[in-house]
């Protein structure tokens, strides 16, 4: 369980650094890239790969979606501009449990809230930064 949490944290740091290096901008000239390599021609990121049994995160602005290159299904998503991070974490936790996901771990530290959920054979990890800067959702269907 600790290894999974640390791996999730490393993935989150990678995604956050990608966001910082590429510039988290609302500029209309920017073209967010989806995980399948296609460019979006609008400021919105394509949510068509979002799994049906995974609730959509509604407490922030979607920044990036990365899809599994083999299946085309969501691998991870990054959200920004979280107005109330603690409430957002609790709301999403409740939404996951209501959709049949089982809590595997729930953790907090001075920087974030993190939770892992299982719905065999699938899993999802959620990491919410306490400063409201980012939320990462990592989904695995294996």
Image: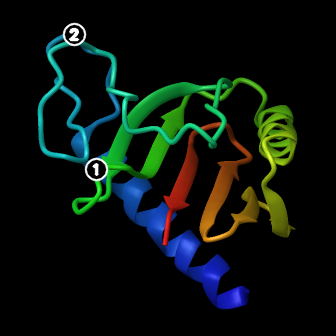
Marks 1, 2: nearer the viewer? 1
Could you tell whether 67 is left or right of 92 in the image? left
Decide which of 1, 19 is in the foreground and name it.
1
Question: Quarter of the image containing the N terminus?
Answer: bottom right
Instruction: Name the element at disc 2.
Output: loop
User: From where the camera sits, is residue 108 visible?
Assistant: no
Decide which of 49, 59 is in the foreground and name it.
49
Residue 67 in the image: state x and y as whole percent: 32, 51
Tell me the crowding category of disc 1: few under 14, some 14 to 19, or many 20 or more residues within 10 angstroms, Cα based. some
Asked if residue 113 is positioned above or below residue 32 in the image, the reply reads: below
The residue under the point 76% across, 61% down is 115
User: From where the camera sits, is residue 125 visible?
Assistant: yes
The residue under the point 14% across, 15% down is 41
Residue 54 in the image: state x and y as whole percent: 62, 42
Asked if residue 102 is positioned above or below residue 22 in the image, the reply reads: below
The colouring scheme, among rainbow, by chain, secondary structure or one colour, is: rainbow
The residue under the point 13% across, 44% down is 37
Label count reads 2
Mark 1 lies on residue: 72
Residue 123 in the image: state x and y as whole percent: 62, 65
Q: Are marks 1 and 2 in contact (CB under 8 Å)?
A: no
Instruction: Name the element at disc 1.
Output: loop
Could you tell whether 99 is left or right of 21 in the image? right
Residue 26 in the image: state x and y as whole percent: 33, 17
Residue 28 marker: 2
Residue 22 marker: none
Could you tell whether 28 is left or right of 128 in the image? left
Q: Earlier in the sequence, mark 1 or mark 2?
A: 2
Decide which of 45, 12 is in the foreground and name it.
45
Asked if residue 122 is positioned above or below residue 74 in the image, the reply reads: below
Quadrant for residue 3, please give it: bottom right
């Amino acid at each position: 369980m600790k290894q999974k949490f640390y791996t999730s944290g490393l993935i989150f740091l990678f995604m956050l650094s990608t966001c910082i290096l590429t510039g988290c901008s609302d500029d209309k000239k920017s073209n967010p890239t989806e995980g399948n390599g296609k460019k979006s021609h609008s400021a919105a990121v394509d949510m068509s790969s979002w799994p049906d049994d995974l609730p959509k995160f509604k407490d922030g602005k979607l920044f990036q979606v990365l899809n599994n290159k083999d299946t085309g299904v969501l691998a991870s998503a990054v959200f920004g501009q979280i107005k109330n991070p603690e409430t957002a974490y609790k709301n999403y936790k409740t939404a996951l449990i209501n959709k049949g996901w089982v809590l595997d771990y729930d953790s907090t530290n001075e920087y974030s809230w993190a939770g892992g959920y299982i719905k065999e054979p699938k899993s999802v990890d959620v990491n919410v930064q306490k400063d409201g800067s980012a939320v990462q959702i990592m989904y695995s269907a294996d």
